[in-house]
Image (cartoon, rainbow, N blue to C red):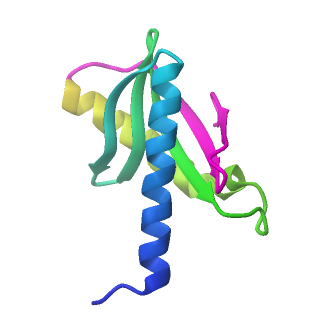
Amino acid sequence: MPHSSQDVHKKVLGRKGEKLVAQYLKKQGCKLLLKNYKTPFGEADIIVKDGDEIAFVEVKTRTNANYGAPREAVGYDKQRRYYKIAEYYGLQTGEEPNARFDVAEVYADGKVEYYKNAF
């Protein structure tokens, strides 16, 4: 099934946001472990090691705030999926991660707002 131009735009915008957040996290001293980590429960946008914690990061990129702050789009269902993704990651790596769940907002101007322990 062909993708609409709006779908392609969203995908490109999302990947750009993920790239900006990965750069931001590296500057903060985090070690990038995985991007776009796919599991049976969904995908984690970014996984980094930050000190003794493994941060599972959901990236929300928006061109404007017409529909509220991007972080507000990370609802209960998305949070539950991230908990399952973290469990799956632990099973796959053989280690029980000291997990943290963060949200990064990226705006059209490249500004990044980062929320540790967002949920």
Q: Residue at x 49, y 69 (%)?
A: 10
Q: Is residue 107 magenta?
A: yes
Instruction: Tell me the residue at 45%/19% (across/down).
Output: 30
Q: Residue furthest front?
A: 109
> Percent position (x, y) of residue 99?
46, 24
Q: Quadrant of the N terminus?
A: bottom left
Total numbered labels: 0
* Residue 101 on image: x %, y %: 54, 33
Q: Give the left or right position of residue 40, taking residue 11 as reference.
A: left
- In the image, residue 106 lies at what x, y percent? 62, 48
Q: Is residue 69 above or below residue 66?
A: above
In which quadrant of the rendered image does the C terminus lie? Answer: top right
Up/down of 3 relative to 58, above or below: below
Residue at 51 percent across and 50 percent down: it is: 17
Asked whether, in this view, residue 92 is left or right of residue 30, the answer is left
Quarter where residue 92 is shown = top left
Residue name at image x 46 percent, y 40 percent: 83
- Whether residue 117 appears in magenta in the rendering, the answer is yes
- Is 17 situated above or below 25? below
- Magenta-drawn segment: 94-119
| Residue located farthest toward the top when viewing the structure as drawn | 52
> Where does the image place residue 116, in percent across and percent down from the top left?
63, 28
